[in-house]
Image (cartoon, rainbow, N blue to C red):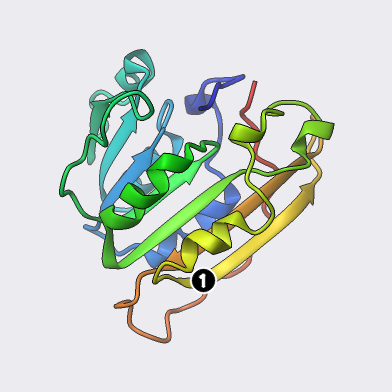
């Protein structure tokens, strides 16, 4: 579950997501899960992807109306069955959202050569503010465990990061499916990714 302190539309994309966006080919089908106002949906649509932006907040999704390349779906991701049935995606992006029962359907929805980009808060963040509920905090190495289900890790990091407002504890993963052609190009590291910024 996630709550936004500021509208996603007012925030730049996560530097972690931006770094690995080049691993998604133009025309790819991208799922932006728990997208809020769709900052990452906009990023991938601008790069030529076909994006499905999913969130339970229909008002937030309305801000994506008319954005070329973006379709929206209002869905209860926690109190209802997985809403995407047999759909498959070339890339799945999840930022600042954790509902562990979705790990299996997310993995099943990723194409065999697809890219998973995941970034959210981890245990230890409770020392710095919200979220502090363990249900919304990854255990140490938990995203690596998710990747062990047939994915290859492109990059992973976890730990305390400094931000303008406050410190945070995060985990970040970029991983690809087993049919991704090796070697895949490593994106330029660019500026170091900052903290996850939009939790109230």
76 shown above or below 189 = above
User: Residue, x 35% and y 23% (percent of image)?
Assistant: 79
Image location of residue 39, percent across then percent down = 45, 35
The residue to which callout 1 is attached is 153
Q: In which quarter of the view is residue 178 placed?
A: bottom left
Image location of residue 44, percent across then percent down = 36, 48
Q: In which quarter of the view is residue 133 placed?
A: top right
Image location of residue 47, percent across then percent down = 34, 53
Which quadrant of the rendered structure holds the C terminus?
top right
Image location of residue 1, percent across then percent down = 51, 27
41 shown above or below 152 = above
User: Residue, x 48% and y 64% (percent of image)?
Assistant: 147
10 shown above or below 150 = above
Q: Is residue 139 left or right of residue 146?
A: right
Q: Is residue 170 left or right of residue 184?
A: right
* Dot 1 alpha-carbon crowd within 10 angstroms: few under 14, some 14 to 19, many 20 or more: some
């Amino acid at each position: 579950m996630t709550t936004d302190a500021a509208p996603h539309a007012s925030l730049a994309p996560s530097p972690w997501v931006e770094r690995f966006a080049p691993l998604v080919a133009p025309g790819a089908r991208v799922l932006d899960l728990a997208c809020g106002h769709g900052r990452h949906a906009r990023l991938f649509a601008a790069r030529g992807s076909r994006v499905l932006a999913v969130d339970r907040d229909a008002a937030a999704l309305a801000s994506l109306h008319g954005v070329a390349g973006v379709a929206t779906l209002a869905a209860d991701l926690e109190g209802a069955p997985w809403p995407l049935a047999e759909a498959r995606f070339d890339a799945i992006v999840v930022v600042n959202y954790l509902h562990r029962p979705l790990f299996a359907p997310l993995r099943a929805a990723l194409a065999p050569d697809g890219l998973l980009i995941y970034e959210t808060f981890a245990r230890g963040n409770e020392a710095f503010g919200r979220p502090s509920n363990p249900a919304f905090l990854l255990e140490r190495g938990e995203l690596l465990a998710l990747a062990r289900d047939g994915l290859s890790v492109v990059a992973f990091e976890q730990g305390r990061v400094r931000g303008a407002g406050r410190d945070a504890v995060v985990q970040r993963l970029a991983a690809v499916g087993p049919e991704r052609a090796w070697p895949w190009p490593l994106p330029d590291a660019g500026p170091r990714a900052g903290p996850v910024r939009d939790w109230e």
